[in-house]
Amino acid sequence: MNFILLDEAAAQSPMGGGSMTWIMLIAIFVVMYFFMIRPQQKRQKELRKFRDNLKKGDKVVTVGGIYGTVSEIKDSYVIIEVDGNVRIRFDKASVLKDSSDLIQTK
């Protein structure tokens, strides 16, 4: 008799549990998009714009942490003057950011 009552109670339970699961799953993806994916795309867009607008004389930092001044720009690479007559060729994608705001002069 107990088995019959349990089966009837299970059969009469609301079916909203399945739709609630989908709503929560979609909500998680929406939150992930706005807090993780969208900001990353924005940073990549800004970085691409920065690299496209590089000009001679800009002070930059590379991915490897080398500070220098842009002395020549080509389509796929940048020549950076590090110190005196020391010039290093870097792939354009390895230029990370503008270092003029990072360098503190006393």
Image (tube, helix red, strand yellow):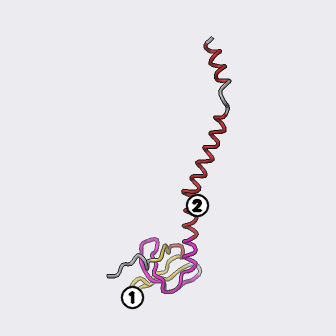
- Residue 93 lies left or right of residue 10; in this view the side is left
The residue located at (41%, 75%) in the rendering is 102
Residue that label 1 marks: 84
Choose between 95 and 9: the one closer to the eye.
Answer: 9
**Quadrant of residue 35 in the image?**
bottom right
Magenta stretch holds residue 17: no
The residue located at (61%, 44%) in the rendering is 25
How many residues crowd mark 2 within 10 Å: few (<14), some (14–19), many (20+)? few
**Quadrant of residue 105 in the image?**
bottom left
Q: Amino acid at mark 1?
A: Gly
Question: Residue 11: x and y, percent?
Answer: 68, 24
Question: Residue 69: x and y, percent?
Answer: 45, 83
Instruction: Point out the frontmost of discs 1 and 2.
Output: 2
Tell which residue pokes out farthest to the left in this image: 106
Magenta stretch holds residue 64: yes
State the quadrant of the C terminus: bottom left
How many residues crowd mark 1 within 10 Å: few (<14), some (14–19), many (20+)? few
Choose between 14 and 48: the one closer to the eye.
Answer: 14
Q: What mark, if any, has residue 38 been given in the picture?
A: 2
- Residue 23 lies left or right of residue 80; in this view the side is right
Q: Amino acid at mark 2?
A: Arg
Choose between 13 and 98: the one closer to the eye.
Answer: 13
The residue located at (45%, 81%) in the rendering is 59
| Magenta segment boundaries in residue numbering | 46-74
